[in-house]
Amino acid sequence: MFGDYSLGDLAAIFAMQGFAGLILFSVFLLMALGLAIIFGQMGVINMAHGEFMILGAYVTWMTSNFFQAYLPALFSGYFFVAMILAFLASGALGMLVEWGLIRHLYKRPLDTLLATWGLSLILQQCYRSIFGAREVGVDLPQWMLGSFQVTDAIQIPINGVFVMCLTILITCAVAYVLYWSRWGRQVRAVVQNRVMAGAVGINTERVDRYTFALGCGVAGIAGSAFTMIGSTGPTSGQLYIVDTFLVVVFGGAASLVGTIASAFTISQAQSTLEFFLSGSMAKVLTLLAIVGILMLRPQGLFSLKVRK
Amino acid sequence: MFDNPRFANRSELLGIAVLALLLLAILPLTLDVFRLNLVAKYLTYSFVAIGLVLCWGCGGVLSLGQGVFFGLGGYCMAMFLKLEASSAANTKIQSTPGIPDFMDWNQITALPFLWQPFHSLTFTIVAILVVPAIFALIVGAAMFKRRVGGVYFAIITQAIAAILTILIVGQQGYTGGINGITDLRTLKGWDIRTDHAKFVLYFVEVACLFACIFAAQFIRRSKLGRILVAMRDKEDRVRFSGYSVANFKTFAFCAAAVFAAVGGALFTLEVGFMSPSFVGIVPSIEMVIYTAVGGRLSILGAVYGTLLVNAAKTSFSESFPQLWLLGLGALFIAVVLAFPNGLAGIWRDHVQPRLSGSGKPGKPWEAIADKTPAE
């Protein structure tokens, strides 16, 4: 099958395919980060995670329209404003949902799953009523269009590079917040022993609420980043939810390194297989391999050793 | 397993009798064939719901992949019917006569190996029961032996549902792709599309449903069923008492899978096609919500829950398509937050005491709300 290509062509194909895999990796990681906080740390199954992401995407779309209409001079920088707004909007909705729904269900993880599925249906219908059933896309500012010409045959799109940089930045920020800040210590204390954490004076309810809100906010940023590489519709979130959960479970819940490693493995496996097989078979084989590995090693790639 | 003399107490028998009256007399006499066929379609989902009562309500194992088993049963039946519909005489305009039309469209020239045995009705019926059971056995045994439970099991079964859907859609030449297997005509020469056939099939289905209800009731009343409940509430204690928890869970999962597959096969017969839209994540979760609305601990509740949610879905989505998703979402949340025991719980806690005239509520049911997670 490689007979028709010269060696240089092949190298270029593999480089571009590898880069496509890296973009997929960024996407998976951005989606999984929020879930790693909510599911990994708190043990809450949020099936509406995709809808929080889509909220971020719609906020970005609205911001871009606003800038286009009223502040065309600043259009090239709208994305940074949009990201902050997306974070705030998704985070605020997350806080509301935690207060109204999730906090009643901490003892019933399976029921959280059903309730948040109901929430996702409601949100989808709201998006459809407000923004219409058609997918929307944003206009990218001029500097994000085009691509770097590395060699004659290799082109690397700028928006892809931007999304990757953004992913690295957000991952570092989340890691800092969870592992090095005072608040992150409180979160981990509550996760490991709720009663004891309360006894030493941590306001566990507040920690829960802000943890959930942070996870949702990160999902909002992920949705915001999505608008740069694809369009957004009311049901786009649902497409990703299984992948996202598998990334988190495969990496080992409660482990940020695991999430990164598993997002990398899954995305590279999928994009490499896509080159050899059809897209659907690549996806099937990747998912099957993950499920198979999870059956043999249910705790995932990296597991936190905690005495229960 | 036979040491429990009472198969069902009086009120349970009464409940089954009322359901029988409703399904066998009231509905067939009052509804036209079109509506009756709709009821038949809904009832096929209630097989899945009964399975979920055993597996989730009693055993505490939530499977979000019941659509997989529904689909396996349905596809087995559909393959048989499709082969009968695509006899050499019916398909002589194709470039390869005698194979299903979608294979011909996808340039497949010979019947695939997997399809060969489905010429036989006996094999098909055995396959409907055995294929899902073996599949559930493999998945269940692999996971429960390693003590994967609860949330992780739910996510993995959901992933399996996603995989199967992508596979069916992707392998268009072998499975009919996104359209599924359509244009099914006869069962052993008997046309299943006529009104008369639909009427007969409805009664066949109700008979199967009652067989499933009795089987589920038997399992629940037996010692096995009690171990399932014990396991749900305090898994470690059951394990320390010397029971193999994994085997019991696997059994419940397999039983639920077989029920779902029977439902799927009947669905194909009733509706006349099978497609991946009954296999994936969304239908699988909807099936769980039927069970939750009916009451996850009540076998009869599951049947009523399925009928009510589907009837509501049909009438709402006909008149207010926008409101339907909002209503369904709100129903999920309301059932989970306020009525974890579903309709059956409301009936038992509020209606039954009034009927019996004692005026005081019955004993609270097995309290789900206070249950701590099993892990």
Image (cartoon, rainbow, N blue to C red):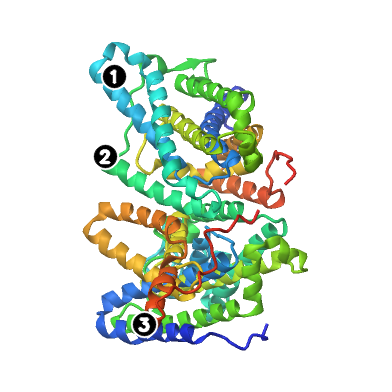
Q: Measure the C-alpha gap from mark 1 to mark 3.
A: 61 Å
The numbered mark, 1 or 2, whose residue comes first in the sequence reads 1
Tell me residue B239's x, y (percent).
74, 64
Tell me residue B241's x, y (percent).
76, 68
Residues flagged by tags 1 and 2 on a common chain: yes
Residue type at numbered disc 3: Leu
Tell me residue A93's x, y (percent).
40, 36
Seen in the image, is B86 located left or right of residue A110? left
Q: Residue tagged by mark 3?
A: B23
Q: Do the residues under discs 3 and 2 have CB atoms within 8 angstroms?
A: no
How crowded pointer 2 is (Cα within 10 Å; few <14, some 14-19, many 20+) is rated as few
Is B135 drawn above or below residue B361 in the view shown? above
Q: Measure the C-alpha gap from mark 1 to mark 2.
A: 20 Å
**Helix or strand or loop: what does disc 3 sit on?**
helix
Tell me which residue sits at (28%, 38%) in the image: A131
Is A134 drawn above or below residue A86 in the view shown? below
Residue A266 image-quadrant placement: top right
Q: Do the residues under discs 1 and 2 have CB atoms within 8 angstroms?
A: no
* Label 1 chain ID: A
